[in-house]
C-alpha cells in the first residue's frame, strides 16, 4: 500500500531525474517548455497503468510546451502535453515532500499525471485560477472517446496561509463514456512561524460503477502534516492519514486504512539530503502480510539519500 516502496529489505533506487525547462516570459520570450526524464522504481510505478503501449513514454515524467498569451495584466499561461496532476499535498519528487515515503492519499486517492491542455491565470500574488481538458487519469493514450475537465483555485492572502482547491470530472472506464469519475481535492497550508508549518489535505472521489454495486463507488480521506525546522540542517515531520475505500475500488479491498509517519531530516551538505523514517500503517481488514500470514498492520523503517543539483547555481 505504498506508491514507490515495493522493494523491501534491500538497497533500491527510487528515481534519478533530469529536468530541462524554460519559463515563458512576456519581456523575453512567450514560449517555454519543460521536459522531465526519470529512471528507477518511482518512474516504473508512475507509468505502470498507462493503457497505451507498455513501454510508451516509460521514462517520461513530464513533457509539455508553454505559451504566455497576452491576456490581462499578467498573461494567461497555456501548457500542452504531459504534466503531473495538480491534486494532492505531495508530489513525485522526494525532496519536495516533508516525509520520505508517499502517503495513502497520494497513492490511491488521486492520479499521478495527465495529458492534454491546461491554462492558468494569476490575477495577482494572492489569487489564481486554472482549468484543464485532458484525456483522463494516468493516460497519454485515452481509454475512451470522452475527455476529463477540471478547474483549480489558489488563494494566498499572506505568507502564513494558502488554500488550493481543485476539481475534475470525466469518463474513466475503458470504452465507456457514460460513467463519470469525480474528484475534489483541498489543500490548506498554515505557517505560524518560520520554523513551524502545517498542512491539511482532504480528498473525495466518486464514480465508476463496479460489478455488483447499484451505486457508483466512492472513496474519501484526509491527511494532516506538521513540520518543525530546528535549524538550517535539521527538521522533523509527522504525518497522519485516514482513508476510506468503502467499495474497494482503489485498494482492491473494502477497508479503512490509517497511517502514521515520523521523518527526521538532516542536510549533510548543500546538495545532500538524508532522511530517517518510521511508519506504521493499519487497516480494519487483514490486508497486510507478516511472512505468509495476513495481518492488520505493518511497521517499516526506511533510510534515504537525496542528491540535488541545479546547473543554474553555476551560472
Image (cartoon, rainbow, N blue to C red):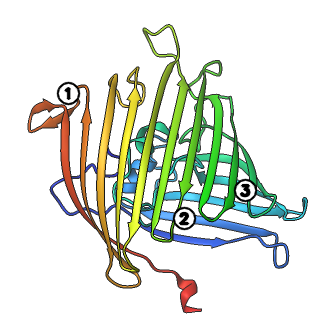
Q: Considering the image in quadrants, where does the N terminus appear?
A: top left
**Vertical order, 212 against 256 (above or below):** above
Choose mark 2 or mark 1, whichever is in front.
1
Residue beneath the point at 65% across and 18% down: 178
The answer to whether any part of residue 3 appears in the image is no
SS for tag 1? loop
Q: Residues within 10 Å of mark 1 (few under 14, many from 20)?
A: some
Q: Considering the image in quadrants, where does the C terminus appear?
A: bottom right
Q: Sequence-wise, which precedes: disc 1 or disc 3?
A: 3
Dot 2 and dot 3 residues touching (CB under 8 Å)? no
The answer to whether any part of residue 50 appears in the image is yes
Residue extending furthest bottom? 315
Residue beneath the point at 63% across and 49% down: 164
SS for tag 3? strand
Q: Sequence-wise, which precedes: disc 2 or disc 1?
A: 2
Q: Give the labeled residue for mark 3.
A: 79
Q: Is residue 262 left or right of residue 249?
A: left
Choose mark 1 or mark 3, whichever is in front.
1
- Label at residue 36: 2
Q: Residues within 10 Å of mark 2 (few under 14, many from 20)?
A: some
**Vertical order, 148 against 249 (above or below):** below
Q: CA distance from mark 1 to mark 3?
A: 44 Å
Residue beneath the point at 50% across and 45% down: 201
Residue 61 appears at what percent x and percent y? 52, 57
Q: CA distance from mark 2 to mark 3?
A: 15 Å
Q: Give the labeled residue for mark 1.
A: 286
Give the camera-side residue of 185 and 114: 185
Q: Is residue 63 left or right of residue 119?
A: left
Amino acid at each position: 500500500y505504498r506508491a514507490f516502496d515495493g522493494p523491501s529489505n534491500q538497497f533500491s533506487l527510487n528515481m534519478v531525474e533530469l529536468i530541462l525547462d524554460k519559463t515563458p516570459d512576456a519581456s523575453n520570450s512567450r514560449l517555454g517548455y519543460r521536459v522531465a526524464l526519470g529512471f528507477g522504481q518511482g518512474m516504473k510505478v508512475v507509468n505502470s497503468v498507462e493503457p497505451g503501449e507498455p513501454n510508451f513514454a516509460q521514462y517520461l515524467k513530464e513533457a509539455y510546451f508553454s505559451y504566455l498569451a497576452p491576456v490581462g495584466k499578467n498573461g494567461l499561461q497555456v501548457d500542452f502535453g504531459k504534466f503531473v496532476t495538480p491534486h494532492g499535498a505531495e508530489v513525485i519528487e522526494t525532496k519536495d515532500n516533508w516525509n520520505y515515503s508517499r502517503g495513502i492519499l497520494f497513492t490511491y486517492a488521486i492520479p499521478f499525471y495527465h495529458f492534454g491542455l491546461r491554462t492558468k491565470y494569476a490575477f495577482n500574488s494572492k489569487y489564481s485560477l486554472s482549468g484543464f481538458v485532458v484525456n483522463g487519469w494516468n493516460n497519454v493514450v485515452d481509454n475512451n472517446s470522452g475527455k476529463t475537465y477540471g478547474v483549480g483555485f489558489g488563494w494566498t492572502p499572506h505568507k502564513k496561509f494558502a488554500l488550493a482547491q481543485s476539481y475534475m470530472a470525466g469518463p474513466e472506464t475503458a470504452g465507456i463514456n457514460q460513467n463519470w469519475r469525480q474528484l475534489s481535492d483541498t489543500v490548506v497550508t498554515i505557517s505560524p512561524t518560520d520554523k513551524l508549518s502545517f498542512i491539511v489535505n482532504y480528498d473525495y472521489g466518486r464514480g465508476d460503477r463496479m460489478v455488483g454495486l447499484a451505486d457508483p463507488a466512492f472513496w474519501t480521506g484526509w491527511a494532516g502534516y506538521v513540520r518543525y525546522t530546528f535549524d538550517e540542517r535539521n527538521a522533523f515531520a509527522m504525518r497522519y492519514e485516514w482513508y476510506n475505500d468503502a467499495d474497494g475500488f482503489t485498494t482492491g479491498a473494502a477497508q479503512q486504512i490509517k497511517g502514521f509517519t515520523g521523518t527526521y531530516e538532516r542536510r549533510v551538505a548543500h546538495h545532500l539530503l538524508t532522511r530517517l523514517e518510521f511508519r506504521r500503517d493499519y487497516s480494519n481488514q487483514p490486508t497486510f502480510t507478516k511472512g505468509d500470514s495476513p495481518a492488520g498492520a505493518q511497521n517499516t523503517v526506511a533510510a534515504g539519500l537525496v542528491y540535488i543539483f541545479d546547473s543554474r547555481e553555476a551560472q
